Amino acid sequence: NFFIEKMFSDEIFNADPELLKKLASQKWLHWGARYVRTSEYPLNTYAQNLYNLCLYSLFSPTKIDRILELDRLQAPGEVRFTVPELFKTVSAGVWSELNSLPSDDDYYTNKKPLISTYRRMLQRIHLKRMISIMLESSPLMPEDGRTQAWRTLTVLEERLSKAMDQLENNSNIDDYSR
């Protein structure tokens, strides 16, 4: 849970705007890289790459296979970390906003959204990773991983549908979070 709380919190990207103005984007161009047109520090790009790396690492075929192997090696009664627990824990951390939906008295704007840019980015990446695992044709991904990705998507669809129904008539929600 420490990892989820710290890594998936958007607070890690709350840098001082003055500091960000002093940082510069990389000017070096590689023959395979696209041209960089802005001089701002690409914090969004780094955040996206970090989230992609974390979620790929957490849900890699090797990691899932290792958890399954360790589960088989445990003696009965020993504390185990399971593949379903991995999927449920990460999903709960990524989609934690669904646990406490705003009331009609709460007010969010496009400048102060309910779900921050980084959290929305993380949620999209998580969704894409679950879809990728489920549809992956690689023989390296254990079937238990595919099954848990499917279950995660099914539960997520239910939770999102409930949230949308609950927020449907709430006009105090920003456009990004709708």
Image (cartoon, rainbow, N blue to C red):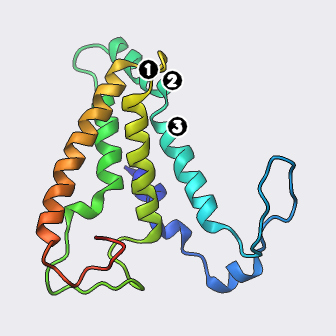
Sequence-wise first label, 2 or 3: 3
Q: Residue at label 3?
A: 57
Q: In the figure, 79 relative to 10: above or below? A: above
Amino acid type indicated by mark 1: Asp
Q: Are marks 2 and 1 in contact (CB under 8 Å)?
A: yes
User: Relative to the observer, which residue lies in front, 175 or 118?
Assistant: 175
SS at mark 3? Answer: helix
Q: Residue at label 2?
A: 62
Amino acid type indicated by mark 3: Ser
Q: Residue at label 1?
A: 65
C-alpha gap between disc 3 and disc 1: 12 Å
Does 57 sit left or right of 33 as displayed?
left
User: Relative to the observer, which residue lies in front, 170 or 107?
Assistant: 170
Q: Position of residue 10 (x, y in %)?
A: 46, 67
Residue 54 seen in this snapshot: yes
How packed mark 2 is, by other alpha carbons closer than 10 Å (few <14, some 14-19, many 20 or more), is some
Amino acid type indicated by mark 2: Thr
